[in-house]
Amino acid sequence: MDTWVTAILQGKPKQACLVMAEPASGSTPAQVGTPQRCNSDDPQVREMQDNISKFRESFTPKGSNGAAEVKVAETQSTDDKALIPADKIYVGGQPLDAVILSNSTGLEKEQLDVKVESTKIDSSWWVTNIEFNVG
């Protein structure tokens, strides 16, 4: 998780892609971030990288140059999934939700709900979803 947030802060969506995956669904096997996949021109990969690039401004603490230290507090996982709330992800010593709020214009704490889902696939943990609810 910290690698994913760090890649976002540094403006490196391809690096973020390398720790992301799409879990298996039905008969479709899991698709993990590989150099081949993350460097491809696949429209789905490109869209994901474009979306990740949009998080950079919101995730970067004021006055930071993208080199802020990222730490993730231990969270409970059930089976092979973990849902990490933004207040358990620290960027430059601040909870990610506080960073996002400081970069917003008029958004209040009770209006923001951000969680990052991580899924264990083939004995490794991958970022598989981000829930970004505003309102």
Image: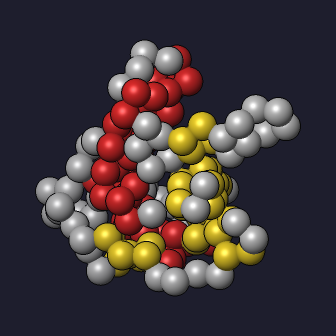
Q: Is residue 1 visible?
A: yes
Residue at figure coordinates x 45%, y 24% from the top left: 46
Q: How is the image coloured?
A: secondary structure
Residue 92: x percent and y percent? 26, 74
Residue at figure coordinates x 50%, y 33% from the top left: 48
- Residue 119's place in the image compared with 50, above or below, is below
What is the number of callouts on the image? 0
Horizontal placement of 30 versus 42: left or right?
right
Residue at figure coordinates x 60%, y 55% from the top left: 122
- Residue 98's place in the image compared with 112, above or below, is below
Residue 6: x percent and y percent? 30, 58
Horizontal placement of 121 versus 68: left or right?
right
Of residue 76 and residue 58, the one placed in the foreground of this image is 76
Residue 70: x percent and y percent? 32, 70
Which residue reaches farthest right?
26
Residue 31: x percent and y percent? 60, 37
Residue at figure coordinates x 52%, y 17% from the top left: 43
- Residue 39's place in the image compared with 29, above or below, is above
Which residue reaches farthest front?
122
Horizontal placement of 114 versus 6: left or right?
right
Q: Quadrant of the N terminus?
A: bottom left
Of residue 21 and residue 115, the one placed in the foreground of this image is 21
Of residue 96 and residue 29, the one placed in the foreground of this image is 29
Q: Is residue 103 visible?
A: no
Q: Quadrant of the C terminus?
A: bottom right
Task: Specify the quadrant of the image occupied by residue 80.
Answer: bottom right
Of residue 67 and residue 35, the one placed in the foreground of this image is 35
